[in-house]
């Protein structure tokens, strides 16, 4: 065998080995694998429990706020100019109340109770050689009656409107002065004469109630009260109507 034939035989062997190796490699095609199924969520979720309000609740508390008045001249024979009374300023008063709230329909309630109601005004002036000041208050026994919306849940929205009949109890004025001789003095004037025995006020409130126990809640309720009729008798020279802007805070106890 000459060299040419040997060379040809080597080429055939090399080509045959290369072809068989390529065929083996091409056979190693890995088929696409299916993605592993996602793990199931085995977390146990507690169902949401809707916190509903009791059908009937009792409440009590106290209020604190600013009181002022609408004061105008009376018409007719008894009218007088306001004079220095036009300079009267608001005062701060407190109140106490107890009541009951009963469901009418779903989240709508009738709310009524009893309350001590107080309004008034103040006046003061100071001159170089004298001074004078007074604080006037009008006390009433009141029966607030309100239509309230109260949302469900632990944190509740309260909003309502109503009326408040008021029975007049007493007028009191605390006076203090310093005369031109530098002598100080004081006096208390108290009376039930010359005042309307029954008045009525319009109410509006909006606030929140937080239920922190099974049947116990704390409420925070800003409220406004506008007196609709005159505090004074028809023979008075003025028409006086009390106005109160207060915040009521108290506890509510569900009873059924």
Image: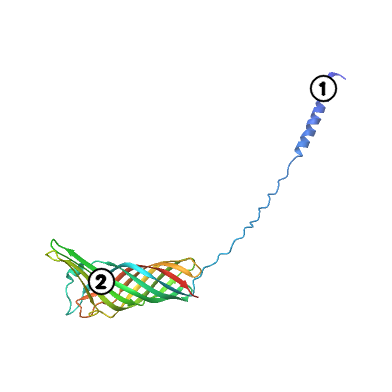
164 w.r.t. 13: above or below: below
Q: Residue 63's quadrant in the figure?
A: bottom left
- Mark 2 or mark 1: which is in front? 2
* Of residues 119 and 61, the one drawn nearer to the viewer in this rendering: 61
**Residue at (79, 33) in percent of width and height:** 19
Q: Residue 240's quadrant in the figure?
A: bottom left
**Residue at (82, 22) in percent of width and height:** 7
41 w.r.t. 131: above or below: above
Measured from the top left, where is residue 123 in percent x and y?
A: 21, 67
Q: Residue placed farthest to the right in the image?
A: 1
Left or right, residue 155 beside residue 30: left
Q: Is residue 144 visible?
A: no
In which quadrant is the N terminus drawn?
Answer: top right
Measured from the top left, where is residue 150 in percent x and y?
A: 45, 70
Measured from the top left, where is residue 186 in percent x and y?
A: 19, 69
Protein image colouring: rainbow
Left or right, residue 248 beside residue 169: right
How many C-alpha atoms fall within 10 Å of the one at disc 2: few (<14), some, or many (≥20)? some
Left or right, residue 90 beside residue 40: left
How many C-alpha atoms fall within 10 Å of the one at disc 1: few (<14), some, or many (≥20)? few
Dot 2: element? strand
Q: Residue placed farthest to the left in the image?
A: 181
Q: Which mark is residue 7?
A: 1
**Residue at (79, 29) in percent of width and height:** 15
Q: Is residue 138 visible?
A: yes
Dot 1: element? helix
Q: Residue placed farthest to the top in the image?
A: 2
Q: Are marks 2 and 1 in contact (CB under 8 Å)?
A: no
Q: CA distance from mark 2 to mark 1?
A: 126 Å
Q: Which mark is residue 70?
A: 2
């Amino acid at each position: 065998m000459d060299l040419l034939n040997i060379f040809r035989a080597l080429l055939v062997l090399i080509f045959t080995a290369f072809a068989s190796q390529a065929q083996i490699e091409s056979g190693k095609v890995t088929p696409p694998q299916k993605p592993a199924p996602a793990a199931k969520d085995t977390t146990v979720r507690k169902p949401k429990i809707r916190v509903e309000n009791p059908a009937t609740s009792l409440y009590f508390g106290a209020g604190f706020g600013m009181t002022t008045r609408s004061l105008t001249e009376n018409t007719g024979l008894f009218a007088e100019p306001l004079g220095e009374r036009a300079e009267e300023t608001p005062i701060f008063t407190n109140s106490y109340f107890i009541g009951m709230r009963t469901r009418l329909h779903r989240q709508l309630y009738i709310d009524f109770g009893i309350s001590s109601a107080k309004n008034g005004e103040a006046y003061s002036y100071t001159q170089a050689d004298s001074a004078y000041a007074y604080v006037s208050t009008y006390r009433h026994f009141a029966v607030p009656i309100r239509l309230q919306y109260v949302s469900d849940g632990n944190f509740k929205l309260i909003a309502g409107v109503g009326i408040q009949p008021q029975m007049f109890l007493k007028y009191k004025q605390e006076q203090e002065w310093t005369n031109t001789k530098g002598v100080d003095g004081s006096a208390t004037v108290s009376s039930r004469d010359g005042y309307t025995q029954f008045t009525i006020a319009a109410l509006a409130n909006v606030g929140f109630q937080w239920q922190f126990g099974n049947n116990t809640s704390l409420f925070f309720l800003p409220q406004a009260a506008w007196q609709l009729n005159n505090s004074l008798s028809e023979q008075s020279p003025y028409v006086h109507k009390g106005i109160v802007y207060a915040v009521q805070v108290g506890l509510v106890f569900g009873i059924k």
